[in-house]
Image (cartoon, rainbow, N blue to C red):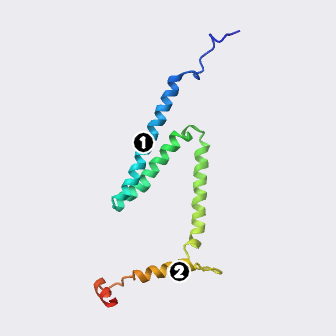
Amino acid sequence: MSDATTAPDSGHGDSGHHEDHSKHYIKIWGILLVLLVASIIGPELGHPTVTLITAFGIAFVKAYLVIKHFMHLTVEKRYIGFLMLTMLAFMLVFVAGVAPDVMKHEGQRWTNDAAKAAVEKGLKAHPPHHAGEPADQKAHEQH
């Protein structure tokens, strides 16, 4: 019969191990916070490339950090990755299936009057430039 003094240590009472995890999570949280600030400041610079990098690049990095360190998907069984890829494929099939209808302004028995009105309003505000006609001449003819 064994008593509590000879029982193997399960590691549950190790406070140093818990502190290491806490420091790790705080470090990742700090990195996420810095990336948040960068993704807010980036578009303020007004450069399209910087805006795209901060909007999509930093969002990708933040999502990766959350998945890896907070959701613990990297330690799950491999079928989790398979399920995620399968769901992504279903999402892409769904988008490909509805995009042709969503991007149209009319169908067999329906019309999107709001989209048509928005396009017409935009064309009136900024008429398209015709090839071969200088932009200055067209602007001069309108006034």
> Residue at the spot x=36%, y=58% of the render?
44
Left or right, 13 with reference to 137: right
The quarter of the image holding the C terminus is: bottom left
- In the rendering, at what x and y percent does residue 37 appear? 40, 49
- In the rendering, at what x and y percent does residue 26 appear? 46, 36
Is 68 rendered above or below residue 15?
below
Judging by the rendered image, the residue that carries numbered circle 2 is: 116
Tell which circle, 2 or 1, labels the residue nearer the N-terminal end. 1
Is 140 rendered above or below residue 95?
below
Please tell me whether mark 2 sits on a helix, a strand or a loop: helix
> Residue at the spot x=54%, y=73% of the render?
103
Q: What label does residue 50 carry, if any?
A: none
- Observer-nearest residue: 17 or 85? 17
Left or right, 138 with reference to 71: left
How much space separates mark 2 and mark 1, taking CA atoms?
Answer: 45 Å
> Residue at the spot x=51%, y=25% of the render?
17
Left or right, 20 with reference to 83: left
Residue type beneath disc 2:
Lys
The quarter of the image holding the N terminus is: top right
Name which quarter of the figure residue 45 lies in. Answer: bottom left
Q: Are marks 2 and 1 in contact (CB under 8 Å)?
A: no
Please tell me whether mark 1 sits on a helix, a strand or a loop: helix
- In the rendering, at what x and y percent does residue 28 appear? 45, 39
Judging by the rendered image, the residue that carries numbered circle 1 is: 31
Residue type beneath disc 1:
Ile
Graded by Cα atoms within 10 Å as few (under 14), some (14 to 19) or many (20 or more), the crowding at tag 2 reads some
Name which quarter of the figure residue 27 lies in. Answer: top left
- In the rendering, at what x and y percent does residue 124 appear? 43, 83
